[in-house]
Amino acid sequence: MTTMTDSPVGTPTESFRLSMLLNDTRYRSLTFQFIALVAIIAFMAFVGGNLVRNLAEAGLNISYQFLYEPAGYDINQRPIEYDSQSSHGRAAIVGLLNTLIVAFLACITATVFGVVAGVLRLSNNWIVAKLMSFYVEIFRNVPVLIWILIIFSIMINALPGPREFRGDTPTASMSFFDTVAFTNRGVFAPAPQFNNSFAATAESGATSGTMDWLLVIAALLLSFFVARAIGTWASKTQESTGNRPTTWYLTLATWVVPVGLVLMFLGLTWNVPELRGFNFSGGMQVRGSLIALWFALAIYTGAFIAENVRAGILAISKGQTEAAGALGLRPNRIMSLVVLPQALRVIIPPLISQYLNITKNSSLAIAVGYMDVTGTLGGITLLQTGRAIETILLLMLFYLTVSLLISAVMNVFNNRMKLKER
Amino acid sequence: MAEKTVSFVRHDQIPPSPPPASETGPLKWARENLFSGWVNTILTVLAIYFIARFVFFAFPWFWNGVWDAGSIKECRDILTAAGKSTGACFAVLVDRWDHLLFGFKYPATEYWRPTVAFILLLVAAAPALFYKYIPSKFLLFTALYPFIAFWLVWGGSLWVPVTILAAIIATGLVFRLVEGLDFNLRRVLAGVVGLVSALGLAYLLYQGATELWFISNSIGTGGIFTVIVSLLFKAASVFMFVFFIPMGIFVGYAIYDDAEGGGLVTIVTTLFALYAMLAFALGPVSTFINNIIPIELLAVPSRDMGGYMLSLILGAVCVSLSIPLGILLALGRQSTMPLIKGVCVVFIEFIRGVPLITLLFVANVMLAYFMPPQSNFDLILRVIIMITMFSAAYIAEVIRGGLAALPKGQYEAADSLGLNYTQATRLIILPQALKISIPGIVNVAVGLFKDTTLVSVISMFDIVGMIRGPIQQSTDWISIYWEVYLFAALVFFIVCYSISQYSQWLERELRTDHR
């Protein structure tokens, strides 16, 4: 502390002393920030200097040229066209799409598991509630990596190999009326194909291409908007007349008819997998690694979502339920009109951060050989090119972008759902 | 006395008759809890069906388990000989018990050391966990525990941790000594310390400035982006060149000027003393004492750690390091100084945005590029740094929630009592904020402990790495999975479930509001 001996109390112009930069609250925060700035720059100098020297010693430089060079490795799950002659950059994009595929599937499945378990855990059925508590506690308290490996081991060890389906007395048989085969090489399921596909050439016969699917999606979108219009019309009629017209058959027709017409026009057939030689061919193959990752992430995160759902429902005070009951609403209407809309406000923010966790945890794909972006860019590309810094930075950038996007969505949602307090 | 008109009057109450059988006991309970409606009845039947199927499937497998066999083939032969169609090979757990717990490189004669360290961990944690019920003097053992555990697990000379401990105690003594110095001596000391720090700092900053210039020149002129980066480094370098002398003078003068009463002299002197002791005295002193009184354990290098022990080491070290770091980050994020706040926000959001695996990749292949060329950090230390940073960011967010939940009145009341920032934070804000944050911190700690399994991906042999590597790929136990993975799941479940139960208990214990 500076003493006041030099300048008598009351003089407005106190002479500036250097120590005031430290002890006077008016300047102290500036001083601290200046020191912090210098420290940061010094840290960057240290790290950057080391980096430059180490790179020079190893004869490396920072360059992203490798992204355009042929990758030379194969990826077993390809959402877009890719072969070993494609570039490292394309391999990274394939991996990225694979990440998004497994994350998307796992998010949906986890939500289903979580909501079912969360609601059932509050059920007054003792045995079901206990069963769900078991599920939640067991899956929450064991690392997700162990679950992924357990399910993957079951997939490759406990399921029959394709050749066990062969012969006159096969030891294994296909499920679902001989259409789906669960094997240790993955699940073979029928794939939709179109006789009048846009992608069909003279010799290839039935196939399916991007255009066909775009057409199907367009039909679904059309149905969505029409169905919404029907709903709005029904609500308007209800408001003006008091009676809500019965619309379920209209809505059903809206959803079924356009898609049905499009599929008929395209000539939908199913390509059922068949045993040829030592493996199944035809249909679509969902690999064991994808199933293990998908199912493990879903069941693990589902346990967390169940807790969020339970907390959300418990957060709605009993008075709300009772008040709704006093107004004469029946239990399922109370749930859908009073409790759930309020509970969703509590449930959705943690739900979205669980989706974020799924996306980040999907990087564990590398443990079961699923070729996600960590497996292609951060795995084989890194090993082949030796460009550790570039690949890891790109990898981080990708995950960072996804998480920032998801948090942006969350913020928009929070602002919309915020209680309007007066 | 009135005439008797009624033939019978009851004078005592009839004892209540028992309720009907369907309204009491287990029957009523079952009817209310299991069969209260047709939906519930279906659910109950389904649940019982699933439980029964599970039990009929899993119980014989468990009951027929073979505990004594040398390989998976032998184990299956035993099962076939006994005529069992299903059965577990728990023999792998017996056979590879040491590997699962300690990894395959830790010397077998020394297994008692991590075991003792683990038991002592429970003893040391107890006074902190149950501070209300255990006298606080036992916390002394908790404070000593890191040194004991370090010596037990890593081995080497006992005198190394003892000397470090002595250095820390000596630093405390130096602090007391300087604080109590008489005014003139203090002024002299402040002069000396100020001069030394001015010269040292100026030298360091000068080095930094030349380093920045060097970086700027070696970036080259490849494209517009590299040119911009290069210019930025040049600007930083010029900034440092301009300020290295004024900064040195300023800091030196501030220390000198502070001699009258401030704590700056004391703190800087103490730091100098600590640095001097650790850098110059530690090695010679511990070697010297060890030559006279040799007390040594077999030294085990970090790369030989493995098994479940590795997870416990990583979990305990990273949790205890990341809580203080997380508190600092949270306070920094709440700070009114834009630069400090910005740095904290960027750090937290960056770490929270990327998966732990990418950070472990950084530890594995990238961190070495950022260290001085000759330095030789071992992998376990790099992993500890990255995991600590990772969980610190999450803990910071939890604590920020706690800080934000405090009513503004608490901050204002602390200010009005005349407390400065440190006092207010330490005495008023943090105790309340941390109390609110306990469940969140425990969640992060449990998550962190589970995430330690990820180190198996960067070829460290924790329990999952041991299973996937040396056990499943050995000829004896090739592709065995249920038994080993269930064991791994079980050991994690025990620890994580106990921690979460403890946190719920602590929450009830700390509840000071009205019930």
Image (cartoon, rainbow, N blue to C red):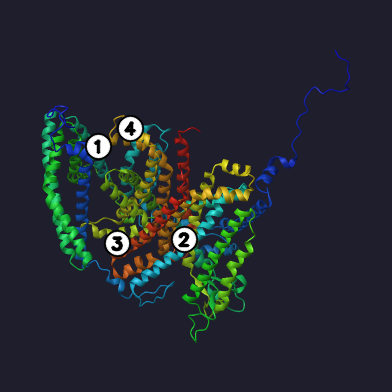
Mark 2 or mark 4: which is in front? 4
- Mark 3 against mark 1, which lies toward the viewer? 3
* Callout 1 secondary element: helix
Label 2 or label 1, whichever lies nearer to me, is 2
Instruction: Nearest to the eye among marks 3 and 4: give it.
Output: 4
Q: Residues within 10 Å of mark 3 (few under 14, many from 20)?
A: some
In the image, A172: left or right of A204? right
State the count of labels: 4
Q: Which residue is under mark 1?
A: B169
In the rendered structure, the residue with mark 3 lies on which chain? B
The tag on residue B82 is none
Q: Secondary structure at mark 3?
A: helix
Residue B470 in view: no
| Amino acid type at mark 1 | Ile
| Residue in the picture at 16% in, 56% down | B235
Q: Name the residue type under label 2.
A: Ile
- The CA span between labels 3 and 2 is 25 Å
Task: Report x, y in % for residue A313.
Answer: 54, 47
What residue is pinned by disc 4? Answer: B414
- Amino acid type of the residue tagged 3 in the rendering: Val
Residue B80 percent across, percent down from the top left? 58, 65
> Relative to B330, is A190 above or below?
below
Q: Are marks 2 and 4 in contact (CB under 8 Å)?
A: no
**Image coords of residue B434 (percent x, y):** 38, 40
Residue A148: image tag: 2
Q: Residues within 10 Å of mark 4 (few under 14, many from 20)?
A: some
Q: Does residue B340 show up?
A: yes
- Tell me the crowding category of disc 2: few under 14, some 14 to 19, or many 20 or more residues within 10 angstroms, Cα based: many
Q: Mark 1 touching mark 4, by CB under 8 A?
A: no
Check chain identity for marks 3 and 1: say if they share one.
yes
Give neighbour class at mark 1: few <14, some 14-19, many 20+ (Cα, 10 Å): few
Q: Which residue is mark 3?
A: B365
